[in-house]
Image (spheres, rainbow, N blue to C red):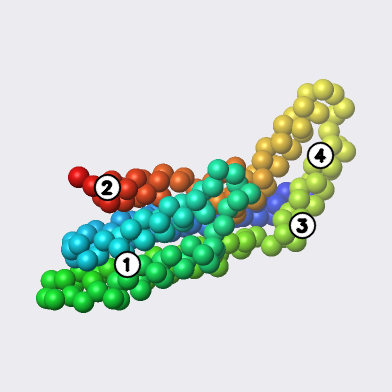
């Protein structure tokens, strides 16, 4: 049982670490997405009034993407919404129609297209990563190991209230670790979810930038 206990502790710790690393990576991708949207709007604004149609469509994309990732109810999360991506494509089409008259505007347009490509890459990356995580069979095996371990503890523990209470509290603590693994692997739909603040701030900034003075 000592071997089973040691292996279970190591595996549980590694799974929690791996799930946390994945969660942090998804958080970074959302932050990068919001920053690229802001930078794209800035490039279009510096390009001139000709970029306003693309900026308006970019605002619609940002609002739609925010609603996809952070809806009011978790069951409505749509990480890979093709209709939202089509809005980004419309932004790119509007930018391709621009005809820069000098090197300055040509540079702004090149930077805008680069940021649009980054936004598209992040969109697909979030979609491809959805659903990936620890294999369920591995989690079931871990739960079996832990169940066997606590059953052995209960078999040899003195039959009194203190022993029973200690085993129950330990079981709750370990099951909380397993639940944390499952929650961290659902960064948009779990109880522990990614903060929507970066995307909300981006939408607010775009609304302010597009509002008439």
Q: Are marks 1 and 3 in contact (CB under 8 Å)?
A: no
Q: Crowding at label 2, few (<14), some or many (≥20) Cα neighbours within 10 Å?
A: few
In the displayed structure, does residue 63 sit left or right of residue 133? left
Badge 1 marks a residue whose secondary structure is helix
Give the Cα distance between marks 3 and 4.
19 Å
Q: Crowding at label 1, few (<14), some or many (≥20) Cα neighbours within 10 Å?
A: many
Say which of 196 and 11 sits in front: 196
| Quadrant (top left, top right, bottom left, bottom right) of the C terminus | top left
Q: Are marks 2 and 1 in contact (CB under 8 Å)?
A: no
In the displayed structure, does residue 7 sit left or right of residue 111? right
Name the front one of labels 3 and 2: 2
- Is residue 20 visible to the viewer in this orientation of the structure? no
Name the front one of labels 2 and 1: 2
Give the Cα distance between marks 2 and 1.
23 Å
N-terminal of the pair, mark 1 or mark 3, is 1
Residue picked out by circle 1:
115
Residue picked out by circle 4:
153
Badge 2 marks a residue whose secondary structure is loop
Q: Crowding at label 3, few (<14), some or many (≥20) Cα neighbours within 10 Å?
A: few
Give the Cα distance between marks 4 and 1.
57 Å
Give the Cα distance between marks 2 and 4.
66 Å
Give the Cα distance between marks 3 and 2.
56 Å
- Is residue 186 visible to the viewer in this orientation of the structure? yes
Residue visible at 35% across and 74% down? 93
Residue visible at 39% across and 69% down? 90
Disc marking residue 141: 3
Name the front one of labels 4 and 1: 1
Name the front one of labels 1 and 3: 1
Name the front one of labels 3 and 4: 3
Residue picked out by circle 2:
211
In the rendered view, tell whether residue 122 sits above or below residue 176: below
Give the Cα distance between marks 1 and 3.
44 Å
């Amino acid at each position: 049982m000592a071997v089973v206990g040691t292996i279970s502790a190591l595996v549980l710790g590694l799974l929690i670490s791996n799930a946390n690393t994945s969660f942090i990576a998804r958080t970074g991708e959302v932050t990068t997405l919001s920053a690229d949207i802001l930078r794209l709007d800035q490039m279009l604004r510096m390009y001139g009034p000709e970029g306003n149609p693309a900026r308006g469509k970019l605002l619609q994309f940002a609002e739609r993407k925010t609603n996809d990732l952070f809806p009011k109810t978790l069951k409505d999360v749509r990480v890979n919404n093709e209709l939202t991506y089509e809005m980004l494509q419309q932004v790119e089409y509007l930018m391709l129609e621009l005809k820069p008259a000098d090197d300055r505007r040509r540079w702004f347009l090149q930077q805008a297209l680069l940021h649009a490509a980054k936004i598209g890459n992040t969109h697909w990356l979030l979609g491809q990563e959805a659903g990936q995580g620890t294999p369920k069979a591995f989690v079931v095996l871990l739960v079996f190991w832990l169940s066997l371990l606590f059953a052995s503890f209960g078999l040899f523990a003195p039959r009194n209230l203190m022993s029973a209470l200690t085993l129950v509290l330990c079981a709750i603590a370990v099951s909380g670790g397993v639940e944390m693994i499952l929650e961290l692997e659902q960064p948009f739909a779990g109880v522990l979810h990614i903060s929507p603040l970066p995307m909300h701030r981006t939408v607010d900034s775009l609304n302010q930038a597009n509002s008439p003075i």
